[in-house]
Image (tube, grey):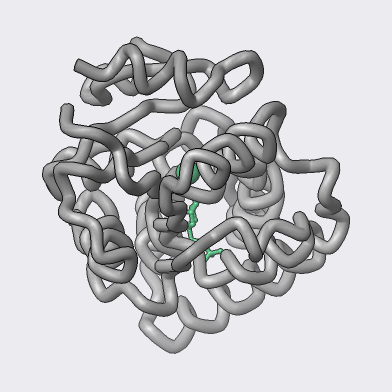
């Protein structure tokens, strides 16, 4: 790929492990409605917006609700989620992420956030990581969820960098597809077997330097 000028990071599962809090909050909602949500089913929700996640959960439970009830449940889930997120501190950034971002900044590579979450700024504030990002595209700005490329295209535009010079870091299948659809190179964070549509898959940032990773991009 051409020289990397910008890196766009997903938040949940890439910068911090919030999936466990989303799971607890969604599971409580499911239990309230009389069914359970497994960890495996929770995987389906990664990278998916709040309301789309609710629709998937209701389908799992075979529950039909009107829009007003859905909005009420989603709001309740979010309050529970935010309560759980209060325990996030700067120490909760995933291993190596902060150092990796420092290296990017030292190399004058622009850094953006591309997340479906409407809580992205709150989480980044709890992590004390807001200042790492030259732009933040979150669930309050996008109108189309991943795998649509909108979130990453908006990030690239904010940073005035053409898509082919952008690198996307994603832990969700829908997120990798979003980056690919944006015409960007994609780095999967997780398992090769799950994220096989990514150009490169790494387990995380621990022990991964910017130079090493960029050297692997062809
Ligand atoms: C991320 C997570 C999803 C979550 C979505 C919306 O993409 O991976 O699990 O549903 O953000 O998050 P929000 O904080 O707005 O409910
Ligand atoms: Mg994610």
Which of the image's four quarters has the N terminus? top left
Residue 37 in view of the camera: no
- Spot occupied by residue 54 in the image (x, y as percentages of width and height): 44, 61
Q: Residue at x 65, y 64 (%)?
A: 130
> Residue 161: x percent and y percent?
23, 57
Q: Is residue 4 left or right of residue 89?
A: left
- In the rendered view, tell whether residue 215 sits above or below residue 113: above
Give left or right: position of 116 versus 35. left
Which of these two is toward me, 191 or 84?
191
Above or below, comparing residue 188 to residue 153 in the picture: above
Whether residue 7 is visible here, answered yes or no, is: yes
Numbered-mark total: 0
Q: Nearer the viewer, residue 26 or 3?
A: 3
Counting from the top left corner in percent of width and height, residue 137 is at 41, 67
Question: Which residue does the image show at 46% across and 20% down from the upper left?
Answer: 211
The answer to which quarter of the image holds residue 193 is top left
Quadrant where the image shows the C terminus: top left
The front one of 84 and 104 is 104
Q: Is residue 9 left or right of residue 30?
A: left
Q: Does residue 41 lie above or below 208 as drawn?
A: below
**Residue 206, percent from left and from top:** 65, 19
Residue under the image location 61 percent in, 70 percent down:
121
In this view, the residue farthest toward the bottom is 68
Q: Nearer the viewer, residue 158 or 63?
A: 158
Q: Is residue 2 left or right of residue 111?
A: left
| Residue in view at x 26 percent, y 19 percent | 217
């Amino acid at each position: 790929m051409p020289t990397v000028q910008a890196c766009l990071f997903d938040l949940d599962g890439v910068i911090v492990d919030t999936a466990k809090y989303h799971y607890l909050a969604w599971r409580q909602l499911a239990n309230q409605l009389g069914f359970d949500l497994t960890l495996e089913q929770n995987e389906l929700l990664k990278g998916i917006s709040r309301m789309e996640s609710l629709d998937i959960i209701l389908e799992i439970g075979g529950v039909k609700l009107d829009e007003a009830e859905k909005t009420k449940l989603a709001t309740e889930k979010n309050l529970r989620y935010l309560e759980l997120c209060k325990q996030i501190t700067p120490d909760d950034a995933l291993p190596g992420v902060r150092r990796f971002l420092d290296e990017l900044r030292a190399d004058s590579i622009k850094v953006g956030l591309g997340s479906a979450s409407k809580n992205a700024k709150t989480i980044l504030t709890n992590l004390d990581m807001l200042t790492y990002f030259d732009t933040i595209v979150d669930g309050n700005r996008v109108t189309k969820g991943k795998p649509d490329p909108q979130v990453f295209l908006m990030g690239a535009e904010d940073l005035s960098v053409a898509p082919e010079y952008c690198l996307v870091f994603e832990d969700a299948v829908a997120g990798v597809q979003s980056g690919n659809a944006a015409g960007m190179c994609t780095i999967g964070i997780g398992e090769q077997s799950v994220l096989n549509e990514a150009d490169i898959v790494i387990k995380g940032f621990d022990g991964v330097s910017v130079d090493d990773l960029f050297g692997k991009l062809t």
